[in-house]
Amino acid sequence: MSDFRLKTPVAFIIFKRPHTTERVFEAIRQAKPPKLFVIADGPREDRADESEKCKATRAIIDRVDWECEVIKNYSEVNIGCAKRLPSGLDWVFNQVEEAIVLEDDCLPHSTFFQFCETLLERYRYDQRICTIIGQNVQLGRKRTDYSYYFSIYNRCWGWATWRRAWQNFDFDMKLWPEIKESRFLDDILIDSKSVKFWQQIFQDTYDGRINTVWDYQWTFNCWLQNQLSIVPNNNLISNIGFGNNATHTKHTKGRFVKTYANMPTEPISFPLKHPPYIIRDLKSDRFMQKTFFEYGNLLTTIKSVIKKRIMKTESKT
């Protein structure tokens, strides 16, 4: 690892959490990317203290002390996570062909950067691959003897991609009605329970009932191209952002948080042991669908129902 010198640009998404931003920034600082794109949303008008938190978070970027071109895309008004991140990545990929992407609560292991850069180069022109992710949620289960495997699922907790893949991103999911009518999810997901789950997710996203995310659209558009994600056999990312200050990972208790918050990372060895084939690991995907997506979505649904009942009760009093 000592001989590795990162050449790939890093896109760093920040907002209002200086405590997590500082830790991720330090990991980036150790990797010393030659080019750092910083994407920041603006404070919300109805949050009195948010302006100062945004300023404190942005001030961390001014600490860059290595040879690096820092390019900032700071919004002075709040656009919202769903639109801010895709618009920021559009800006990044208008300037570079590939990038490593980290949000302000995704703390990478030091080997994450070399893992991404090695595979960005290896699969640069391979249209079968859409993204390289750093998070492994197999909970210690090793599916192959190789350094990584292939999945239909992508995750945004530390990842990398190319302009050639990102250019397919369509926030509005214009093709969803056709895909739904043609029942193509049956061909992609195979089992009926997973089809039902993702059909509801995509319909709610398309209809605007889920309006705080962008990664469901990213998954949908990768599936449209029949593309796979690369997943390391070791977990390289720890999400340190669970809590009340988070946008999506607000849960602070329960099995999901205990399992996925602050997951330990471990180094991946180099040179990488590349699989001699590009085939989806169905067993891994089924495990992830059941333990990560379905369970996590159940918690969100329960929380939403409880919140609505509380609001309904309060309105009657």
Image (cartoon, rainbow, N blue to C red):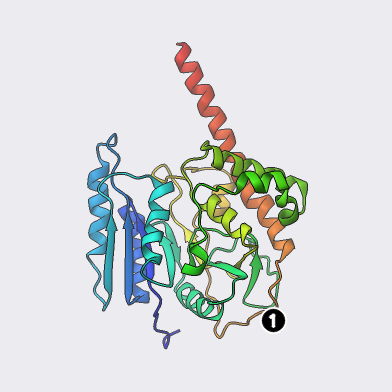
Seen in the image, is 69 located left or right of residue 98?
A: left
The image shows residue 292 at horizontal and vertical percentages of 62, 51
Q: Secondary structure at mark 1?
A: loop
Spot the residue most to the top.
Answer: 317
Q: Which residue shows up at 22% across the image and 58% down it?
A: 59
Q: Is residue 112 above or below residue 191?
A: below
> Does residue 186 appear anywhere in the picture?
yes
Q: Is residue 212 above or below residue 237?
A: above
- Amino acid at dot 1: Pro
Residue at 49% over, 63% down = 166
Q: Is residue 31 left or right of residue 253?
A: left
Looking at this view, is 18 or 210 the one in front? 210
Q: Is residue 184 left or right of residue 265?
A: right
72 with respect to 256 (left or right): left
Nearer to us in this view, 164 or 6: 164
**Residue 161 visible at all:** no
Q: Quadrant of the C terminus?
A: top left
Where is 196 relative to 126, above or below? above
Residue 55 at x, y percent in the picture: 23, 51
Check disc 1 and report the residue beneath it. 276
